[in-house]
Amino acid sequence: MPENHVLIVEDEVNLAELMRDYLHREGIEASINHSGEAVAAFIKNNAVDVVLLDLMLPAKNGIEICKEIRLFSGVPIIMTTAKVEEIDRIIGLEIGANDYVCKPYSPRELVARVKVQLRNKNTDPKASQSLTMDERQLMVSDDHAALNLTAVEFRLLQKLSTQPNRIFNREQLMDAVYTDGRIVSDRTIDSHIKKIRQKLKRLDAHEYIQAVYGCGYKFVDK
């Protein structure tokens, strides 16, 4: 029985079925949504490991759907689009997509990109012994309580916590969070870190994220 499940959100019926067939050949289960409606509800009620999300859909566009998903889940999203303008790519990644592919694309290429996301998910180490991170729900918890993070906050904490005590400079953290390669100011990273630290204090007083003067930040477990 397939261990991984991909949701294909695509209004071109033949293309959606082609992608499903290619994924099945690789032992990956796939479901199809042709309109874009009720995608969030499906993800909430089913175990979905990757979403292939078309930008242009009849009922609701991919950007709106991506925003809805990111309110409750960190499931990897690969956006597919026939629009090749740079602004569309940036917007797609800005609102939480992990990758994008421009149409027409090779089904083999898309399957390869899906496998990259699955590999990242399946090999992600649980480095912290004190905190549990739930990527699907963008939640972090300890033995006593849980709290919600934004997608950016989750990726930052995940990056830091997978290598405890390693110092990451701001540029490295930018690259981890903003995968489209755009440049943001140091203050943006500092602001996100500040918010994460404030939220973590709701769990306990331990300083999980510590600033290293002139260098950056590191994660220190209990």
Image (cartoon, helix red, strand yellow):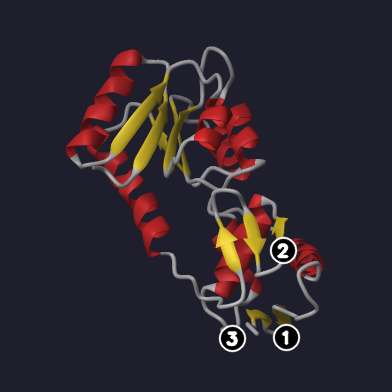
**CA neighbours of label 2 inside 10 A, class few (<14), some (14 to 19), many (20+):** few
Q: Which image quarter: residue 197? A: bottom right
User: How far across and how far down the image is residue 149, in percent?
Assistant: 70, 55
| Label 1 – label 3 distance at C-alpha | 16 Å
Circle nearer the viewer, 2 or 3: 2
Amino acid type assigned to the residue bearing label 1 in the image: Gly
Q: Which residue is mark 2?
A: 145
Amino acid type assigned to the residue bearing label 3 in the image: Asn
Q: In screen coordinates, is 222 left or right of 11?
A: right
| Residue at image coords 80%, 78% | 205
User: How far across and how far down the image is residue 90, in percent?
Assistant: 58, 41
Asked whether the beta carbons under mark 2 and mark 3 sit within 8 Å of each other, the answer is no
Residue 5 versus residue 187: which sits nearer the camera? 5
Residue 158 visible = yes
Q: Which residue is mark 3?
A: 165
Mark with earlier residue (1, 3):
3
Mark with earlier residue (1, 2):
2
Q: Which residue is mark 1?
A: 214
| Residue at image coords 43%, 17% | 34
| Label 2 – label 3 distance at C-alpha | 24 Å
Q: Look at the numbered disc 3 and give the secondary structure of its residue.
A: loop
Circle nearer the viewer, 1 or 3: 3
Amino acid type assigned to the residue bearing label 2 in the image: Ala
